[in-house]
Amino acid sequence: MVAGIRWLSTCMLILLLLVGTSISTAQVAYQGVFSIAAGDVDQTTVVLWAYSAEIGSLTFETATDERFTVIVDVQSAEVIDPMLPVKIEVRGLLPHTHYYYRVTNPVGERRIGTFRTTAPLGERAGLRFGVTGDWQQQVAPYLAIKNVPERQLDFMVLHGDTIYADNASPAVPLKIARTEADFRAKHLEALSPRLGLNTWADARASTAIYAMIDDHEVIDDFAGGAPTSSDQRFDQHGKYLNETDLYQHGLRAFFDYMPIREEAYAQTETELFAGKPKLYRARNFGSDAALFLVDARSFRDQPLRQLPFADINDADKVKAYLAETYAPGRSLLGVAQFELLKADLLKAQQDGILWKFVLVPEPIQNFGALNAPDRYEGYAAERAALLDFILSQRIENVVFITADFHCMAVNNIFQRKTADSPLMPTTMWEIITGPVAVDPPFGPQLFQLVESNKLLTPAQIALYKLLPMAGQDKVLMAILSAQLNRAGYDDIGLQDSDIDATLIKGDYVAMHAYTWTEFDIDAVTGNLLVSTYGVPWYSQHTLAKTPDTVTAYTPELISQFSVRPQ
């Protein structure tokens, strides 16, 4: 057990410590790139987005049929800079309607995309959407999402780390992006063809998009609500890190390259929020579901220190550290956003909406004190307050959808009100989604540590290497579950919980694959079908050495389970 704890601690530390250094701005030209997207859709409006490397006028046409015989809106926008996309907003649309849009660039090229407006409250028509996060530009093209267009989704959530601004990549060989041009080039790189494929451009054209930042849109593990003086990687402008040039450049590029409205918090808000970018979104999809997309980076307080590795087996020091995580007043979301989330959750329950999906980029499920600072467990008082609010208000069918850990993993959620309180099971659960492509993902990284630290026998290591992907997942799942059991939590998965779930295919983890996850609500029963698609992970080296083999990968169904609503 002690060796297992040490191994898990080391792994998580590596995952959370990716810091680069500043070098000059990248200059990247993308001749011939032409990409479109729709996003931030609600019952009557949508944001349409397009990038064209050609300077001049873009025409946007919106229609109710794919032949464009019934055009309901025509607008134009000017491309004045080959690194700047354009956006328009279409209003006056009909609820729960399938629309097509066509964009014509200055040289007469056309792209066609599609989106659906949201259903009105009271309608139960079913819902199908996708979520994923985490893709490094250096391992494009993104084979895991090749099948997104054929799934005919109502929408797709891009759940953070949509670029790795602090990782060098082929088109932007910088350790850390510093200028707006650097950040824009990173986003554009992800939407540009590579090896004959442009999977993100195809996926974004096939459905509506909602998007959220995590840390790598700016820099690893940043805390936007921390004092400027707390992080020397940032310029020392302003009181908070969310007022620095680095943060503002990263957010500026994110808004530029995502099909979302540019909203801001009111100037009457607290100093931390006043006038700052508002990425929080709450959307209802009839009475089937409500989605709450939460910004967990821009307003979080300065993180706690890491629990020293040497202290992991000292019960008194672990207890004292857990007490620190419960210090009152510390916030992951910031007070203003936290209150918005609570109010919107309560309203969804009062309105009779069946499923409530809370999308927080970092996991909220229980992993214990180790490496807690970057997760919701590092802000344990607010975590407990959120869970207590959900429980006390009897808000049912709450699912947390997260990313960041570079694996797919599902588990039920426990509540602990204070550091000394007993653990209390709940009917809430979480699924960690992705990664689309991060080299290496969670599983291989863990195994490298297992092998180098001789935590398995030579025979066990040899057997692991011979196992198929699913078998390797089971080995690591058993080790992780053992660590959770030591802290009093259940095994990974929903099999021993109070949640009415049925495993259909695979398992509740996928640690050796690049993935995305689909959520499908049945219009009649309300049952939720959760399906994870993916491809075997590949490294930069493998991609460079055998590009034809890698680009031939086709996403397959890796994991599937269903959950009956309360």
Image (cartoon, rainbow, N blue to C red):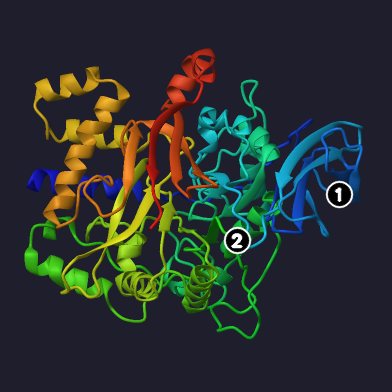
Say which residue appears at 8% left-offset and 57% top-offset: 313
Say which residue appears at 67% left-offset and 60% top-offset: 120
> In the rendered structure, are the residues bearing label 2 and label 1 in contact, judged by CB atoms less than 8 Å apart?
no
Secondary structure at numbered mark 1: loop
Left or right relative to 147: residue 180: right
18 vs 453: above or below? below
Name which quarter of the figure residue 441 lies in. top left
Say which residue appears at 47% left-offset and 78% top-offset: 335
**Residue under pointer 1:** 80
In front here: 475 or 6?
Answer: 475
In front here: 307 or 549?
Answer: 549
At label 2, which amino acid type do we have?
Answer: Asn
313 vs 334: above or below? above
**Residue under pointer 2:** 284
Tell me the quadrant of the picture where the C terminus can be found: bottom left
Left or right relative to 460: residue 131: right
Q: Is residue 16 visible?
A: yes
Secondary structure at numbered mark 2: strand
Question: Where residue 330 sits in the image (x, y, percent)?
Answer: 36, 77
519 vs 178: above or below? above
At label 1, which amino acid type do we have?
Answer: Ile
Name which quarter of the figure residue 463 lies in. top left
